[in-house]
Image (cartoon, helix red, strand yellow):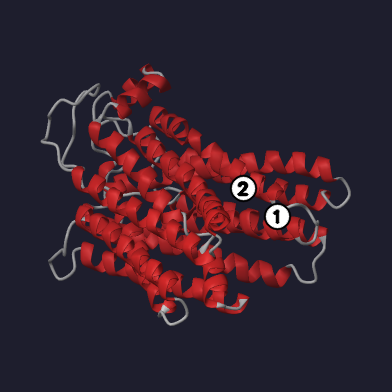
Amino acid sequence: MTDKPLGWIGIVRLGLVQTALGAIVVLTTSTLNRVMVVEMALPAVIPGLLVGLHYALQVFRPRLGFGSDVGGRRTPWIIGGMALLASGGVIAALATALMATNRMGGVALAAIGFSMIGVGVGASGTTLLVLLAKRTDERRKPAAATIVWVMMIAGFIATASIAGHLLDPFSPSRLVAVAAGVSAAAFLLSVAAVWGIEGRKPATREGAAVPRAREASFVAALSEVWSEPQSRRFAIFVFISMLAFSAQDLILEPFAGLVFAYTPGQSTRLSGVQNAGVLVGMIAVALAGSAIGGARLGSMKFWTVAGCIASAAALGGLVCAGLVGPGWPLRESVFALGVANGVYAVAAIGSMMGMVSAGAKSREGVRMGLWGAAQAIAFGLGGLAGTVVSDLMRWILGSPAIAYIAVFTIEALLFLLSAMLAARIGSIRRNRPDQGAASAKTLLAAAGAAPAERIS
């Protein structure tokens, strides 16, 4: 395997895997969700539990990363994970169609399909980020992080648009055909994207890295990574910051409807405003953090901390929106939140890529898997917690505005706590022994976090 850094074409090729991953995920967690509730008349809790199962299985990311560490190559795990993901997408669609005639059988089959989706995302997403981190030059990592995120969003948009047209007029058989077509195309795109990019043989220049990975058990490897202070602090940071990041996902549009009397169309456009802000924030960090004109404007650690603080401030704007009501510039506040979240997200991915090789040799997969598991679990809990807290506060206080203000305040405080944690994740001197590790390699670049399916 060559150690030559990836050029821009190589980075875009790996980004195509994210596009393919996003295409399957958005079809199964969004389109199938709607079909189950509307066309199949199932309680909303059924697709909710299935999507929750998909998130819960992200806990196996460290084990999947360990498997790629043992083999010394990431490509087989990327392709294998995408094969499992694509198969799960088809099975989930078949299960949804089956629900029209056999509800219990369809739900049982859907549980199998969504389980495959969860494991497939974990296997392909974790190893893809490790490969990207190890093969990307340090100066290009901020831009690379933006590229893979934007390409994943492109997968969301393209699939939603194309599948939306192909599904009309709707029928269960058409749903299965569209899902099979999307899954097959995504898998083939992934294979073409990674083919030959890693090489045929695992790297041996780092000594006994691969044999050492084989000798250790997974439990020992995970314990070794957890004993590294920076890896442990980073995992805690990921969990807390992702709780803050995801808690408003399911309540922003209801907030706009109940407090500002937005129509469904207006609230949907408000989400578009937020996503536009996210892209602006990402691009800004990519330009500032990469080598542009021979200068870099701040480290990934700086941008991660700044993104957390800015997100807290933007959430403070939503608190004011709840207090003031319709007179407050809600669209501007939501756009500001999007920009701040975009800065946080892409700086987090860049920081993750910078840190993954810092610490014990041959543990990159376990390390990335640990952080990915923390992110996925927090993301799943965050959306649920936001709705539960808002409903509970509304029941206690009898005011929708105060209920949403409570959630936004908690999110802001979590982001401030995250900024403090990120600031503490600094550098370790070269060759300084670490707890439970053979050595600590290189400077640690900052702190951050990245969303699983959104970055996996």
Say left or right for 63 vs 164: left
The answer to which quarter of the image holds residue 343 is bottom left
| C-alpha distance separating marks 1 and 2 | 19 Å
Q: Which residue: 37% across, 26% down? A: 222
**10 Å crowding of disc 1: few (<14), some (14-19), many (20+):** many
Residue position for label 2: 51
Q: Which of 328 and 414 lies nearest the eye of the viewer?
A: 328
Say what secondary structure mark 2 lies in. helix
Residue position for label 1: 180
- Residue flagged by tag 1: what amino acid is it? Ala
Say what secondary structure mark 1 lies in. helix
* Tag 1 and tag 2, C-beta contact below 8 Å: no
Q: Which residue: 48% across, 42% down? A: 377
- Residue flagged by tag 2: what amino acid is it? Val
Q: Which mark, residue 294?
A: none
Residue ranking furthest to the front: 397
Q: State the image coordinates of residue 78 (x, y, percent, origin top left).
A: 49, 43
**Mark 1 or 2, nearer chain start:** 2
Q: State the image coordinates of residue 59 (x, y, percent, origin top left).
A: 49, 35
